[in-house]
Each structure stands twice: as C-alpha cells, then as structure tokens.
Image (spheres, coloured by chain):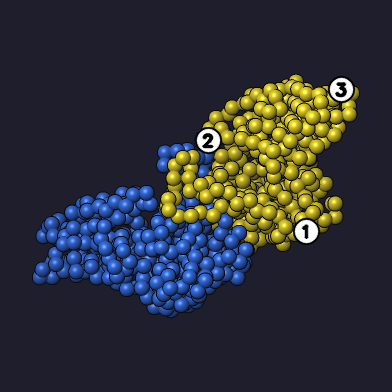
Chain colours: A yellow, B blue
C-alpha cells in the first residue's frame, strides 16, 4: 500500500510511470486490495466495473486512462477511439468527460504528447487535492472542540483526492487536535456510510459510530449532533443540491432541530445549466439493491421495490455550501459562474 | 394453513382445543411455517425465541400459555411457577403481564378452571380483533380513493389480531374497494417493513412497494404520499409516541410537507404513568443488527455501531391518534384515563 504521508497514509488512486494504482473499492471494507492498471483499457474497465467510484476519483482515473492511450497510440484515429471507449465507461459522470477532454486537448498538439498527457492528468489530481484541502480548512473553522458531526454516504478520500469533500472538514478538525465524534449514516441501500466512510474514519483514528439512517433524527432530537456535512453530486444555480438518497431527510431534520447543515463540494459540481433542483435528473436503480444483500434475499420476494439513488435538497434547508472559493449562502451560488 | 375468512385468509395465532398454532415469524417472508405449541413451556419458549412478535400477538400467546398451564397443572404452586416462566419470556412486554394476570385471576377460582382459562385467553384475542376492526374503520374514513399511504415497521395482522393497528385502515380501505398504494419503509435495521409488512400486503393483494427508509422524504417532497399510518409501542399522557426507530424522522418530514401523520394503537398502548416522551425508556440493541445481515458482515468490522431500537415522536408532529375509542388529538390522550 502506498504511503502518502502528506494526505494521511493512503490514497484512492496514484501513478508510477505509466501504471495507475487504485484501491479496489468493491472489496472495501473487508479487503484492502491494490489493483495495477497497465493500459487505458484496464483503467477504463476499472471505471466501468466500479472498482473505483466518486466524482473526483472517476475524473482522475479517466484522465490517466487518456494519458495511457497517448502512451500506447499515436494516430488521431486510435486516440479518438480510445477516448470514446473511456467515455463509455460511466456515461453520466461529468468529471469523466472533463478529464478526457482536457488531457486530449492539451496533449494532442504537444511535442512530447504522452508526457504532456500524464502531466495534465497529474494536474487534475493535484487540483482536486488542493480544492479538497481548502474546503477542509474552511469547513474545519465551523467545527468546535467537542463537536459531534453527522455525515451521509461517502464523500471522503475515496471519492475526491486529498481529504474528500464532506469528510475534508472532519479530517482537518481531527488533525487540528479537536476532539470530535462522527455519526456515519449507514446509507441504505448501498451502505457507503457503513462500508466506506466507516473504513476511512477507522484508518484515520477518528472516533465514530455507524448508525441506521433511521437513527439520525433521534440523535438530533437528543441534541447529540452539532453539525452536518454532506457532499453533492450536482448543485443547481438556485443552490438546490442533488445528492445521495436520504440527504433531503437529514437536511429537514437538521433545520427542525437547529443543527447547521453544510454541503461541501468543489465548484466543478455546480451545474449552471440547471436552473433549480427540478432540473436535476434522478437516477432510479435496480430494486435488487433494496431486496438483496450480496446474493441473499432480505425482503419479501414477490414485492416490488422503488430505488431512487438520489434526492434533491431545496436550498432553504442548507445553511451553507463550502467550495474551494469560500462558504456561500445557497442562494449566492449563481454568482460563482 | 388456517383459513380465517372473516379476517382475511390467515391469522398470526389461533387455538384448536389445547393446542396453539402460530406463524413462525422468524421464517417470514421466505417460508410460511405453522408451529404447533402443545404445552405452556412450548408456547412460552416460542415467545422467548421470538417465533412470534408484536405487542398484541405476544399478549394473546401469553394468555394461551397460562391457559395451557391450567390444563397441565392444578396446584397453586405449579401454576405460579408456570406463570413466572411465561412472564420471563419477554420481560419488557406490557401485554404479556396483562394477559397472564387476567387469565390467572379469572381462572383460578373458577369451577372448571382450564375451560375458563382458555375462554379468557380467547376473549383477549377477540378484544384485540374488535379494537383492530374499530381502528381500521375509523382510519379508513381518512383514506380517499387514490391515496398513497406510507407506513413504517410492521404494525399489521402479525402484530395485533384482526387487521393490526397501522395496517388496519389500509386493509379496510382496500376492502372498501378504494384504489390505494402503500409505500413500505424497509425499516432498518431489522427490516420488518421489507419482510413482514410487504409479506402481509402481498397476501392481501394490496398494491405496494418497499423503499429504503432514506426515500420516504423524497416521495413526500414529490407529493406522492397522501397520509402516513404508524403503530406505537408506548404512548405518554402528553401524546408523545414511542415507536420503532425512524418514526420520528417520518413525522417531521410529514409535517414539513403537509402530509397527515396518524398513530394507530389500542388504548392498552397508552401508559398513563408516563408524563411525557422523556419518560419512555429506549431499548438499545446489539450493534450486530446494524453490522450484520444474517451471518454476513455488511459494515466496516472495526467500527462501532449504535442501535437505538425506538424513538419518541413529540405530540406536535402527530395529526391524530386513532384508538378503539375514536380519533384523538395527541394533547387529548390524557382524557382517556
């Protein structure tokens, strides 16, 4: 496992020469397996098969895949074929297209195109790290000693290089020596909180407990949660935030209980073409994610299940949105354009 | 399987002579197994091992166990020993003590004590059925044709004889020919919604879908839920309601979205010795219920998990409480004493 002391002891993705290394997130938290990706096809397939996930990590991997293609091929025809293959791996991931386009455009006319391609992909990774650190520093100013923090899903270092987004203030507050405690919503149906966030917090030695999503309100009413940090999948001009299903429930409960509710996400998450939350498309996933755990059926077999993967939290429930440019009122998000 | 046409096609518990029959609820929804309980010890053990669950069903079973003891023994010493054994099976279940005491007191001085004991236990069952039907009729008046109903956990026929509590208005509205649809919260961590409520609704042919607890707010915000019915484990004088963890979250979301939120529970659920919700004790159960499904670990092994099994919904979020005596404002509950 790579020792990356600067950002703690591990990273979700890194490169050595032309080889990309990733943590296989499908194996977490039970096994920590590092996978080597030696060609653009291997890297694209790792994105497609969800060995890696999280907006930032997908973007970085796509950038590296494009760079690997530059190392493998030289004709425009071959490179464009590779680009299309990479872009077909997770067709809805905005960061993926941003990264392949940027690497492709910067490298294709360069003298040493494969060197330029890898440098550009590195730069995307470093920008993510930089943004994550700024968001972490900004968010940590809101975290007082003794704070008990709620988070939902996984918006940590597995998802965005550096310190993640929602978890960035948590990592920074912990490094600052503040005594904090994190409640990690398990985040049904895919359990990213119980599996990925809990794994990250454990690695970092940050005190925490997993709770059923049902219990977050209970702890808020008991005055045991001081602040909420969540990530975002897409932010509309209005400040409405699309994020993992259940985020809206936590936001309403936080407002009702006077608990500050912050969204942490880089500016790249803002979609200025979305006027408001109603424009944010909601992916509906397979009922099997609700009805099965692994191959084990856990629900009445003959019943249908509905599985919206995301919801939209209206801006009025959000105390602030933390980006690399500052802490904004949701209604001011459009001014960042 | 017993055909009980009067209350639909099945019952959670019934007797034939001195033998008690139950549906083994630990096997649902995957297998429908009927268990015969031929002695008070077998019946008490079935309560202890949770082959049956739900306040009403536990009470009825305890009454029958006490009656079986009257059939097996005749001395006060033997009967009191049996009573203690039955009462030790689920020591926190209020209905259990009510049933054993009532059967014991009414039978012990009767001429034909075992006959009287079984009749008294039958009477407890029939009272539950009667109360359930009244609550169902009252609640169904609130359900208009086309309504989409949310429920949490299982407060159906498996839990209370007749039509259950929270599900009673659903069964009645369906029988009335109203076109209804039920969203069943899966109800983590024990999944009573996905497993038991979904099973009941399927048996009755009532259109429904299981959703992650995280998705209930999403559907409310989408204006796809018209009314919420939940059960109760204990109701305080103040009208605050203790119920399955997550009930509070749904109540807050319902109020925020203008969705009527009703608690359905017989008067026996009201604990007049509890002044307010803060007096209702909250059982905290094993972290393994969060971290495992069956024997399969589904969370980060080294992380702790907190598992409060119940929460308290303050009266201000509750539109009404439906008992066998009528539909009450929560703040009027104390007048039922």
Image quadrant containing the C terminus of chain B: bottom left
User: Residue B47: where, in percent of width, then height?
Assistant: 29, 54
Element at label 2: loop
According to the image, label 2 marks what residue?
A: B302
Element at label 3: loop
Q: Residues within 10 Å of mark 3 (few under 14, many from 20)?
A: few
Residue A275 marker = 1
Residue at screen point 77% across, 35% down: A100
Q: Chain of mark 1?
A: A
Q: Residues within 10 Å of mark 1 (few under 14, many from 20)?
A: some
Residue at screen point 72% across, 47% down: A264
Q: Residues within 10 Å of mark 2 (few under 14, many from 20)?
A: few
Above or below B124: residue B193: above
Q: CA distance from mark 2 to mark 1?
A: 43 Å
Image quadrant containing the N terminus of chain B: bottom left
Residue A237 marker = none
User: Residue A91: where, in percent of width, then height?
Assistant: 69, 42
Query: Which label sits in the foreground, 3 or 2?
Result: 3
Q: Which residue occupies the foreground of this view, A66 or A323?
A: A66
Above or below B78: residue B252: below
Do the CB atoms of the residues marked 3 and 1 lie less than 8 Å apart? no
Answer left or right for A328 relative to B191.
Answer: right
Q: Chain of mark 2?
A: B
Q: Are marks 2 and 1 on the same chain?
A: no
Residue A112 marker = 3
């Amino acid at each position: 496992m790579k020792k990356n002391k600067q950002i703690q002891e591990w990273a979700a993705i890194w490169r050595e020469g032309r080889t990309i290394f990733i943590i296989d997130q499908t194996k977490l938290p039970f096994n920590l397996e590092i996978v080597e990706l030696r060609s653009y096809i291997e890297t694209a397939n790792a994105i497609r098969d969800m060995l890696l996930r999280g907006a930032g990590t997908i973007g970085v991997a796509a950038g590296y895949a494009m760079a690997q293609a530059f190392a493998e091929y030289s004709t425009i025809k071959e490179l464009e074929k590779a680009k299309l293959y990479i872009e077909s791996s997770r067709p809805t991931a905005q960061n993926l297209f941003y990264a392949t386009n940027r690497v492709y455009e910067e490298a294709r006319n360069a003298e040493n195109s494969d060197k330029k391609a890898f440098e550009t992909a590195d730069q995307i990774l470093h920008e993510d790290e930089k943004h994550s650190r700024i968001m972490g520093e900004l968010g940590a100013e809101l975290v007082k000693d003794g704070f008990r923090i709620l988070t939902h899903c996984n918006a940590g270092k597995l998802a965005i290089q550096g310190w993640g987004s929602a978890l960035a203030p948590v990592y920074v507050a912990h490094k600052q020596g503040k005594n904090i405690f994190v409640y990690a919503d398990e985040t049904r149906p895919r359990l990213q909180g119980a599996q990925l966030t809990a794994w990250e917090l454990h690695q970092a030695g940050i005190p925490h407990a997993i709770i059923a999503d049902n219990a977050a309100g209970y702890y808020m009413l008991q005055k045991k949660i001081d602040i909420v940090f969540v990530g975002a999948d897409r932010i509309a001009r209005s400040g409405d935030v699309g994020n993992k299903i259940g985020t809206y429930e936590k936001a309403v409960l936080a407002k009702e209980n006077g608990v500050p509710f912050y969204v942490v996400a880089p500016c790249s998450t803002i979609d200025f073409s979305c006027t408001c939350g109603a424009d944010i498309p909601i992916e509906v996933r397979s009922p099997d994610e609700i009805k099965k755990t692994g191959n084990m059926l856990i629900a009445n077999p003959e019943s249908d299940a509905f599985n919206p993967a995301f919801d939209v939290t209206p801006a009025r429930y959000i105390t602030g949105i933390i980006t690399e440019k500052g802490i904004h009122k949701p209604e001011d998000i459009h001014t960042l354009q």
